[in-house]
Amino acid sequence: MIHKNLETAYKAMALVKSVEEGKREDYLRAVKGLGSMIMENGIAATLLFLKKKGLGDVIGHLDELLYLKTNIEDFSSRVIDGKADEPLTASEYLSAQMAAVDGAGWLKRYAEIYFGGDVK
C-alpha cells in the first residue's frame, strides 16, 4: 500500500508540472475543490462537470491516477461516454471513487505548491 501511495504522489507531481502555463490558474481552481466535489456528487457527476467546463487536463490526470490504484483503464470514457465492452461493477465504481478522492488530494497539494496556492 505504501508503494502505491508513493507512486501516486510522484505521478501526481509529474502531472501537475506538465500543465501548460496559460491553464495553471484554471487548473488550480478546479483541483482545489475536486475532492469535496467527488464526495458530494460522486465521480461520475464530477467528471461530467469537468467535461462541461472544458477541464480535460484534470479529467486526464484523474484517469491516470485512477489507473495506478485500480487498474481500470479510461475510467472517464467508460463513465462519461459509456465506452466499454463491459459496464463497471458497483465494486469497481466505488473503488474508483475512493481512488479519485485520494488522487484529487495529491493534485491539489502539488498544484498549490507549484502554482502558488493563492488563487481563489
Image (cartoon, grey):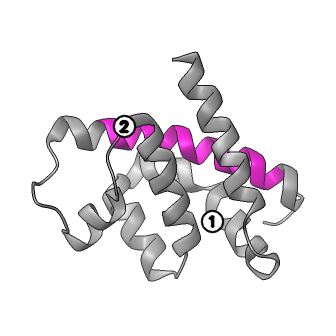
Along the line of sight, the residue nearer the viewer: 40 or 91: 91
Residue that badge 1 annotates: 30
| Image position, residue 1 (x, y; %) | 51, 17
Segment tinted magenta in the rendering: 95-112
**Looking at the image, which residue is at 67% across and 56% down?**
15
Between the C-alphas of marks 1 and 2, the distance is 23 Å
Q: Quadrant of the C terminus?
A: bottom right
Left or right position of 48 against 88 = right
Residue at the left extreme of this rendering: 86
Q: Is residue 54 visible?
A: yes
Q: Which three-letter amino acid code belongs to the residue tagged 2?
A: Thr
Q: Earlier in the sequence, mark 1 or mark 2?
A: 1
Left or right position of 6 against 17 = left
Question: Which mark, by number, is residue 94?
Answer: none
Left or right position of 8 against 113 = left
Looking at the rendering, which quadrant does residue 43 occupy? bottom left
Looking at the rendering, which quadrant does residue 83 occupy? bottom left
Residue that badge 2 annotates: 70
